[in-house]
């Protein structure tokens, strides 16, 4: 995948007809307990109202990436509530909402990269030893912080964590 928008619907048979009606141009792949809705263009943002409504009956994982620019957008909805929302563009975390999820540490702060490049997680900060220690040990994403990620690797981390392609 180089760019596009993917919406994964976990355990939500009731929402399939709604999505087919809303997005007739989308490639929809039915899997065991999930639906993979693939939209060809990146930058598409489904309505938060729609995501909230369909997540009442299903868990929603929405990912939008563009690998040439390492644009990464992620939203996780469950039971009508936004669990996590992230937007990374041009090296900046411009949206960070909700609590960190287990897949994030390995996706954004891989141990081998942190060992090899200790300042990796501190670009845009004072780059002091305290900052390095804080980011390396806690490994958090903060709105307004700056560091590059690989959008394809991030997509893969989400897909792997939630077993989305099984």
Image (tube, rainbow, N blue to C red):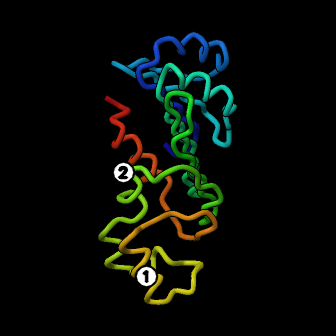
* Residue 71 seen: no
Element at label 2: loop
Q: Does residue 22 sit above or below 117 in this rendering?
A: above
**Few, some or many C-alpha atoms within 10 Å of disc 1 (few <14, some 14-19, many ≥20)?**
many
Q: Is residue 85 visible?
A: yes
For label 2, the residue is: 102
Mark 1 falls on what kind of element? helix
Q: How many marks?
A: 2
Q: Residue at x 31, y 78 (%)?
A: 115
Q: Toward which corner of the image does residue 25 lie, by quadrant? A: top right
The circle on residue 54 is none
Q: Residues within 10 Å of mark 2 (few under 14, many from 20)?
A: few
Q: Nearer the viewer, residue 24 or 140?
A: 140
Q: Where is residue 164 shown, x and y percent of the image?
A: 38, 33
Residue 62: quarter of image: top right
Q: Which residue is mark 1?
A: 132
Tell me which residue sits at (65%, 20%) in the image: 23
């Amino acid at each position: 995948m180089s760019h596009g928008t993917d919406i994964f619907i976990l355990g939500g048979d009731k929402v399939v007809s709604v999505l087919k009606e809303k997005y007739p141009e989308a490639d929809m792949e039915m899997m065991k307990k999930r639906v993979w809705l693939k939209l060809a263009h990146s930058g598409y943002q489904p309505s938060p109202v729609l995501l909230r409504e369909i997540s009442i009956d299903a868990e929603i994982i929405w990912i939008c990436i563009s690998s040439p620019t390492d644009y990464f957008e992620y939203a996780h909805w469950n039971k009508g509530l936004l669990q996590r929302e992230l937007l990374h563009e041009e090296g900046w975390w411009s949206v960070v909402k909700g609590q960190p999820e287990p897949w994030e540490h390995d996706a954004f702060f891989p141990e081998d990269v942190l060992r090899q490049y200790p300042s990796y997680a501190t670009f845009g900060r004072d780059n002091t030893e305290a900052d390095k220690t804080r980011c390396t040990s806690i490994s958090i994403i903060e709105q307004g912080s700056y560091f590059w990620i690989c959008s394809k690797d991030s997509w893969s981390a989400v897909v792997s964590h939630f077993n989305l392609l099984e």
